[in-house]
Image (cartoon, coloured by chain):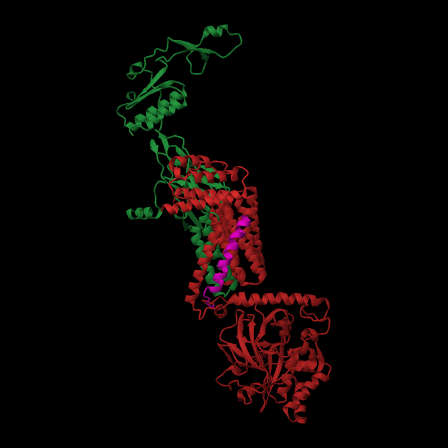
Chain colours: A red, B green
Amino acid sequence: MATSRLRSFVQRRRARPQKDAPPVLLEHAAVPWLLCAALATTLPHVGHLSWWLSLFCGAVILARAWLWWKNGRLPSRWLLFLLVILGTAGIVLNYRTLFGRDAGVALLVLFMALKPMEMKARRDGLVLIMLGFFLLLTHYFHSQSIPTGMWLLASATLLTATLIRMHGGDQPIRHIFRYAAVLIAQSVPFMLIFFLLFPRVQGPLWGIPQDAHAGLTGLSDNMSPGSLNDLIQSGAIAFRAQFASPIPDRARLYWRGPVLDSYDGQTWRTNPLSRSRSTNKAATVETTGNTVADYTITLEPHNQRWLLALDLPITLPKDSGLWPTFETLVREPVRYRTRYTFRSSLDYAANREESQQMLQQALQLPGRLNPRTRGLASDWRRTLTTPEQISIAALRFFREEEFFYTLQPPLLGQNAIDDFLFDTRRGFCEHYASAYVVLMRAAGIPARVVTGYQGGEVNPVDGYLTVRQSDAHAWAEIWIQGRGWIRVDPTAAVAPSRIERGIGAALPAGDPLPALIRIDGEWLSGLQQLRYRWEAVNNAWNQWILGYNPERQREVLSRLGMDNPDWRAMISTMAVLAAIALSLVTCLALVRRTKLPQEQQAWLRFCGRLERFGIRRLPWEGPFDLTSRVAHERPELEQLVREAAEHYADLRYGIGQSKQLQALKNCVKQLASRRRKQV
Amino acid sequence: MRLRERLEQWLFRFGRDERLPVVLTQRRVFILPTRAGLLYGIVLCVMQVGAINYNLSLGHALVFLLAGLGFVAMVHTFRNLLGLRVMPGKADPVFAGEDAFFVIHVENTLRQPRRALELAIANNSEVSLDIPPDEHASVAIPFATTRRGRLDPGRITLASRYPLGLFRAWSYPHPPLSCLVFPKPLETPLPLPSPGLKPAGSRGLSGQEDFSGLRERQPNDSPRHIAWKAVAHDIEHRPLLVKQFDGGAAEELWLDWKMTPSASDTETRLSLLAGWIVAAEREHRRYGLNIPGRIVAPDAGPAHRNTCLEALALHGN
């Protein structure tokens, strides 16, 4: 054999773990690894923790690093205990509980920062790593985006590398990371198999803490001046729609959200009575044309019970209901990105007959407010005969008087509608919708405000229609005997481009809006392309990774050819595939033996065959020693063995030719055939 | 307990390995999760419940990745031992109560390094060993001795937790190992040389008379033997010379079984003799050993010392 070098003797000696033996100590040089692991797992939480906790934890980790550098003594138990108590008390004061989701994460971060302070044994290091793995999971409470996924993959690799460092002693950092990357890479097939086939259960398994869904944005069930304003400033995605049918014109894309029919002079609210199914006429949609849209919506969680659908839905997703106000409601607030499929008819007649209660509510006005508006309405009522004419008069009023569309309206006073209609005349959809409905009601026409989204933008990369919070909109509906509820959008009268081209076009230049919503500017178009790409990737990520729920799983599995995949079939397939992956990994790990030169392989094979004749080559025996022994013990084999030995010796030690390699291989074959003949 | 032993015997196939080197084949490497591995499993379960509860799809992915990592770690821990070749080396004799060190040569025939191999015999402390690809390494495994005689330490435990510490793979290679354990020496003053106790048959030499030459003086030499005449001639202050005599009875010390108190038990008497041998060797005396069944002619030097001690160690066997 070529390279063999005798290496050093006793390297490290330590007590074997026995019942009362001291635990294996943590190497001093492994401490920075663990500190890095602690940092990597806590760092992304900094944005979500209270500043004092971040500072506290950072200081503790820094202090530990300093102690490591100075080779100082770790603090006493009492000091540590005090720190834990202090930190925990701070968390209780801050979060008012210890058991909420955020408080729990804060507590974990605290422990993660303090654990290094008492790290003496390797066991402590292991506990820290386990804690780190758990902390990785908690990052997903805040974000499950692609960058988060990448960061966590990197952190998982770091934690793995730390484990390798802890157990393998000193070796070049590069080697440690390469090995960690190999281990992670080999675990990826398992992840894919489990991800695809592990039977998904729709959470939650139990009631989750109240603070779990804080901070979700979206429409709300009331509208007061300026409430939509914040929403419109946000470029966040509200939902994406994938159309099975052609995408309707932008001007017809009215995504219906909450219907607001109760007004107190400032704020529009939903009236619970209008939603009651027992006292109202059920919502009936009559199809009057043939524009029908089939689409699937991926709704971002908004923590509300309504779904958004094109005006007006005729086929609803499972587990949802159409309320008397034509809102689609589900039983539980939408807390996760969900997909649902609708069919809507864009030409419809809605409730040609309406309950008295609903109509009464749609005429309600706060008493004695807005006298000028009432005056205008009663003028119209006197001069005009039909509700249609009154509505047209109102829209003409908006169009012909000096109204401006802006997201920065002046403040309105007590008589908000009067102020808006006759003085300020500046506002956006919520002002126009609100003023229009008040006018109609004052003129005796049942009317209500509908909020939702208008429009959307088609991503040319994947064909999804993206609707953002900035597409939030408010419009009006009036009820006319015999025709039912009719949608009227007063904003369109003032700023038609808002409806046709989106809010970016409707606003005068200089109004603040997120850059990505604006459509003007040449330099933006390249950026726009990039954004389309990125959002398409993100959407695919959302659809296939994050949105992989029980339904999606069933859909994917049946598309992959598993008919009727129930959990038993999934588990057994998963087990089989995992076993296959495990054996592949095993092969990969085990088969990489030293690749011997070809002639040596052949010679060893020859010697192996020779063993069946009762001759075992001794480890130190060279080819010719073996030949002479064979000549002695099995003379009949001598010639063949000599031939093989000569070829081998030439190839290995002399100037062998490729012919000889073939000859050597032939010898192996001959030996095998001899054996067969013998048997 | 009996059942457990039989179960272990069946499972681990204990027994001395006759064919060398001992190759750790698949059948001989065992693997189980460590405590850390179990903790890892529990943490993953809790994480999975959390991922389900909060509908964290990426959380699922993370848990699945880590589960995969567990499987992969198992394979790699197993691989860390698989195919190692173990050859026994020699073990230097020790006194009872000291640690014997059994040298083991381990050969790595893979292209990957083997790291953090832990070798131990029974409950003795373990030593750790790394072997680069395609190389040998040797390691001395300690074994606390208690009794004299030829020591067979039994099987070696060759284990590893590398890379992640979640699993521990181990094997029980049992190459022939042996070490000679001398009786624990008892420190007592050397007995006076007593010619009367010479064993029958040994040559009676009166070493005081037969002058055989001069040599440099050593600290223990009696001043009576200094070659004063030679010193007187010397003007260059060379070291003192002593006269040497052939094996005189006064120089020659017989360490005899009968000199030990007959009331003591055999082991104590052997320990006394061992102590004398050590002391005699230290004082550069020539000594012989006479115990029932074995007579070692007087001589000096480490080889002689070991012969005598070996005779004591194997007494009665």
Q: Nearer the viewer, residue A656 or A170?
A: A656
- Which residue is at a point 48% across and 70% down the rendered structure image? A558
Spot occupied by residue B108 in the image (x, y as percentages of width and height): 47, 42
Q: Nearer the viewer, residue A136 or A251?
A: A251
**Which region is colored magenta?**
A176-202
- Look at the picture and state if A152 lies above or below B296: below
Give the residue at x 42% y 47%: B169
Whether A184 is among the magenta residues is yes
Q: x and y percent of residue A401 in the render?
A: 73, 83
Residue plotted at (50% across, 36% down): A5
Residue A233 highlighted magenta (yes or no): no
Q: Residue B41: image x %, image y %? A: 44, 56
- The reply to whether residue A26 is in sight is no
Name the image quarter holding residue A606: top left
Asked if residue B283 is positioned above or below residue A95 in the image, the reply reads above
Q: Position of residue B194 (x, y in %)?
A: 31, 15
A595 lies above or below B271: below
Residues A337 and A142: in front is A337
Q: Is residue A168 left or right of residue B176?
A: right
